[in-house]
Image: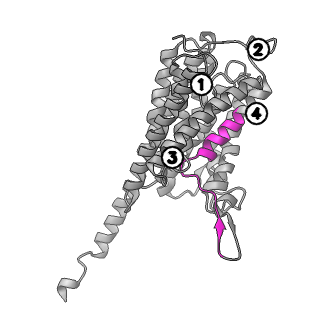
C-alpha cells in the first residue's frame, strides 16, 4: 500500500506550482524585453528610410511612442483591454493598474510592448510631414484607447470576437489570432493607410501624377533595423504562447518560431524574385527582400502555433506577393507611404 501512495506532499505541490508560475512570468518578461528591442529596429529602419534632415524628428517620435504609450497604457489602456469587469466591447477595471493582482504585472508588460509596436507601425507611414503635437495626440489615442479596445474584442474572455457566434446545433465560429496578424498589424496598417491618405504626400513625391523617388539617406541603417525586427519577431510570435512551464508549451513556442522564420524566408525570396523579374525596374533589391521577409513574418502571426511548416512556407509566398501588390496599389492611389507600412514596411530605390 505504501508503494502506491503519492510522495508529493501538499507543500511539494505548492512549491511546484509556485515555480511554474514564476517560470511563466519570467518567460513573459524575457520575451517582452526582446519585443521591446523591436523599437530599436523600427527606429533604425525609419531613420534610414527618411531624408537626413528629418532623422531627429522621426527618432523622437519613436522614443515617445514608447514613453507616452507606457503612460497611456498604464493609466487606461490595459483597463480597456483586459479589465475584468467589462462587456463585449470594452473593459473597465484596473485603471492605473489599481487592484491588479501582482501575478499579472508580467501580462501588462507583455501587452504594452505589443501596443507600442502597433503605434510605431503608423509613424513610418506618416513620416516627414506630420505635425509633432498632432502626432503626440495620435500616439496616446492609439496606444491608450483604439488598440486596447481591439485587443479586448479578440483576446479578452469577454470580447465579442473572442466569444464568437454559437449556433443552436452546438457549432461555433470564433476569432483566432495567436500573435496579432489582425489585432496588431492589420490595425496598425489600416491606421497607417488612413493617416497617410489624410496628411497627403510629401512635397515632390508625385509630380504631374507620376511618382518621384525620394530616397532614404542610409540603406545600411535601414537594413540593420530590418535585421533587428527579424530577431524581434521570433519573440513576438513565440512569446505569444504566454507560458512555458506546462506540458506542450515548449513545443508550441518552438513551432511558432520555426514557422515564423520559414514564412519570413518565403516572403523575402518571393518579393526579391518578383522585383528582379519584372516589377518596375529590374534589379536585386535589398530593401524589397527585407520588406518581403517582414511581411511573411507578419502573416504568420495569426496561426504560427498550429500550421505545419510547409503551410508556413505557402503563407510566406502569398504574403510576399501581397506585399508587392499592396505596395503597387498604394502608389497608384497616390498615397505617400515612405516605409510601406501599409503593405509591409519599406519600398524605395536601394542605391545598389
Front label number (1 vs 2):
2
- Residue 280 in the image, given as x and y percentages of width and height: 64, 18
- Residue 12 in the image, given as x and y percentages of width and height: 28, 70
Q: Kindly report the distance in space between the C-alpha atoms of the residues bearing marks 1 and 2.
A: 19 Å
Front label number (4 vs 3):
4
Q: Label 1 belongs to which residue?
A: 346
Q: Label 4 belongs to which residue?
A: 194
Residue 187 belongs to magenta span: yes
Q: Which residues are magenta?
A: 170-192
User: Is there CB contact under 8 Å for labels 1 and 2?
Assistant: no
Q: Label 3 belongs to which residue?
A: 110
Q: Residue at x 74, y 22 (%)?
A: 131
151 or 86, which lies in front?
151
Front label number (1 vs 3):
1
- Residue 177 in the image, given as x and y percentages of width and height: 58, 52
- Residue 235 in the image, given as x and y percentages of width and height: 45, 42
Q: Label 2 belongs to which residue?
A: 210
Q: Kindly report the distance in space between the C-alpha atoms of the residues bearing marks 4 and 2.
A: 21 Å
> Could you say whether the residue bearing mark 4 is in a helix, strand or loop?
helix
Amino acid at each position: 500500500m505504501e508503494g502506491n501512495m503519492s510522495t508529493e506532499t501538499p507543500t511539494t505541490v505548492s512549491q511546484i506550482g509556485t515555480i511554474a508560475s514564476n517560470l511563466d512570468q519570467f518567460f513573459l518578461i524575457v520575451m517582452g524585453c526582446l519585443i521591446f528591442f523591436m523599437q530599436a529596429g523600427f527606429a533604425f529602419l525609419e531613420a534610414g528610410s527618411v531624408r537626413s534632415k528629418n532623422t531627429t524628428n522621426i527618432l523622437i517620435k519613436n522614443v515617445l511612442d514608447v514613453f507616452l504609450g507606457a503612460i497611456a497604457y498604464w493609466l487606461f489602456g490595459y483597463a480597456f483591454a483586459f479589465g475584468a469587469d467589462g462587456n463585449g466591447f470594452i473593459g473597465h477595471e484596473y485603471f492605473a493598474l489599481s487592484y491588479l493582482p501582482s501575478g499579472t504585472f508580467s501580462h501588462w508588460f507583455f501587452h504594452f510592448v505589443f501596443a507600442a509596436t502597433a503605434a510605431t507601425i503608423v509613424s513610418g507611414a506618416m513620416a516627414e510631414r506630420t505635425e509633432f503635437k498632432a502626432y503626440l495626440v495620435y500616439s496616446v489615442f492609439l496606444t491608450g484607447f483604439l488598440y486596447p479596445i481591439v485587443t479586448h474584442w479578440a483576446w479578452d474572455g469577454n470580447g465579442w470576437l473572442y466569444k464568437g457566434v454559437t449556433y443552436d446545433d452546438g457549432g461555433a465560429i470564433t476569432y483566432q489570432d495567436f500573435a496579432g496578424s489582425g489585432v496588431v498589424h492589420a490595425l496598425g496598417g489600416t491606421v497607417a493607410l488612413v493617416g497617410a491618405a489624410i496628411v497627403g504626400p510629401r512635397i515632390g513625391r508625385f509630380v504631374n501624377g507620376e511618382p518621384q523617388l525620394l530616397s532614404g539617406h542610409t540603406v545600411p541603417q535601414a537594413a540593420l533595423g530590418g535585421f533587428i525586427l527579424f530577431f524581434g519577431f521570433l519573440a513576438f510570435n513565440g512569446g505569444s504562447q504566454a507560458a512555458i512551464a506546462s506540458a506542450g508549451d515548449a513545443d508550441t513556442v518552438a513551432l511558432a518560431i520555426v514557422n515564423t522564420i520559414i514564412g519570413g524566408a518565403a516572403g523575402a525570396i518571393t518579393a526579391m524574385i518578383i522585383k528582379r523579374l519584372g516589377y518596375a525596374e529590374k534589379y536585386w533589391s535589398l530593401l524589397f527582400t527585407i520588406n518581403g521577409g517582414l511581411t511573411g513574418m507578419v502573416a504568420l502571426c495569426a496561426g504560427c502555433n498550429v500550421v505545419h511548416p510547409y503551410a508556413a512556407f505557402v503563407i510566406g509566398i502569398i504574403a510576399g506577393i501581397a506585399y508587392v501588390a499592396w505596395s503597387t496599389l498604394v502608389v497608384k492611389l497616390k498615397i505617400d507611404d515612405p516605409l510601406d507600412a501599409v503593405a509591409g514596411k519599406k519600398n524605395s530605390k536601394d542605391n545598389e
